[in-house]
Structures are given as structure tokens and as C-alpha cells.
Image: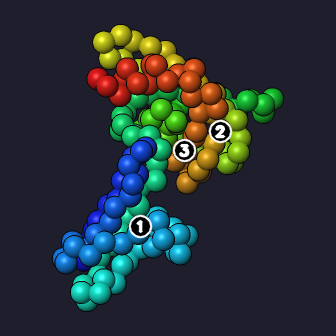
């Protein structure tokens, strides 16, 4: 079964077509019915294909940078992390040691981006996804770190 990935870019409509016959489908309608970002499409030509809808608002860059985080409360929770991806809107990282973090918690993430210049980034974020030691966060004030991140993404 072939996989078709539809990428949502700001200002560009989504497009999805069967890789066998070219018939076009509305990916938003296909995926919203399933309430997920991946679905099998049974095309009228009789050949199924897997449709994956990429709904991120910003392009992500994969990386492997050491950093740390602290929970913005009196809990004293925090620790070392490895950043695995970054975008203008947020960051994904892996915890060095398991911790009971929860979606909705506010944290501060500290890391250094090196390109043509080195930038220490201190970003306030909200935890969006917790999957074991894998954490996904969105920046609370992305405009505060946007220039450093855009410079890094362009490198």
C-alpha cells in the first residue's frame, strides 16, 4: 500500500490524490471523519492508499541538542533533556530520566542553538504531549524566541 503525505503550508490549500489514478480527495474531510491524522483511503479505482495529513503550522527541524527544563511551580521538578526537534511554535524533547509531567503544565526550557552565532535560548512553554519520556511543547510567547529559532532553521 502506498503512502501519500499531505503537507499543510500556510497559505497553500491541502491537496491529496490517489497515487494510482490521480483522483483528487479532500484530505480534511477524510481525516476529520476519523478524528486522526492518518487514514486508509479506498479509491474508486479499487486500490487503497494510506493518507497522512501533516497539520503542523510550522516546519520542524530535527536536532540532537542537550538542554534542561524546570517546571514553573514550587514542585522543584526539572532535569536534563535532549531536544529532538524544534519549530517556530515549539520544541520536542526526550527526558534524561523518567518524570511524571502532565499536559498543560508550564515549563521553562533552556538550550543553546549554534549556527553562525551561538544563542542561549530560555523559552517558556506549555506541555502539549507526554508519551513516556517523549515530551512535546508549544512556546507560550514564540515571538520572544522566534529570531533565534529562524536563524537556526535557516542554517
Query: Who comes first in sequence, dot 1 or dot 2?
Result: 1
Residue visible at 46% across and 53% down in the picture: 55
Disc 1 and disc 3 in contact, CB within 8 angstroms:
no
Q: Which residue is located at x 78 percent, y 31 percent? A: 73
Q: Position of residue 42 (x, y in %)?
A: 34, 84
Q: Locate the N terminus and report the quarter of the image it occupies.
A: bottom left
Task: Name the residue furthest top.
Answer: 117
Which secondary structure, mark 1?
Answer: helix
Q: Which residue is mark 1?
A: 27
Instruction: Identify the element where label 3 is drawn.
Output: strand
On residue 126, which mark appears?
2
Q: Position of residue 84 (x, y in %)?
A: 42, 39
Compared with 111, 89 (above or below) is: below
Cα gap from disc 2 to disc 3, whole angstroms: 9 Å
> Label for residue 136?
3
Mark toward the start of the polypeptide (2 vs 3)? 2
Query: Which is in the foreground here, disc 1 or disc 3?
Result: 1
Q: Rounded to the nearest whole Å, what is the CA distance between mark 1 and mark 3?
A: 25 Å
Amino acid at each position: 500500500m502506498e503512502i501519500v503525505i499531505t503537507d499543510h503550508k500556510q497559505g497553500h490549500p491541502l491537496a491529496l490524490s490517489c497515487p494510482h489514478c490521480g483522483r483528487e480527495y479532500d484530505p480534511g474531510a477524510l481525516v476529520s471523519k476519523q478524528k486522526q491524522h492518518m487514514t486508509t483511503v479506498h479509491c474508486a479505482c479499487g486500490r487503497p492508499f494510506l493518507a497522512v495529513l501533516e497539520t503542523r503550522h510550522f516546519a520542524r527541524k530535527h536536532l540532537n541538542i542537550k538542554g534542561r527544563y524546570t517546571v514553573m511551580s514550587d514542585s522543584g521538578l526539572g532535569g536534563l533533556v535532549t531536544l529532538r526537534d524544534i519549530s517556530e511554535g515549539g520544541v520536542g524533547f526526550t527526558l534524561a530520566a523518567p518524570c511524571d509531567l502532565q499536559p498543560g503544565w508550564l515549563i521553562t526550557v533552556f538550550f543553546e542553538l549554534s549556527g553562525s552565532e551561538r544563542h542561549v535560548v530560555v523559552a517558556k512553554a506549555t506541555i502539549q504531549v507526554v508519551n513516556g519520556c517523549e515530551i512535546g511543547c508549544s512556546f507560550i510567547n514564540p515571538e520572544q524566541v522566534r529570531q533565534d529559532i529562524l536563524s537556526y532553521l535557516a542554517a
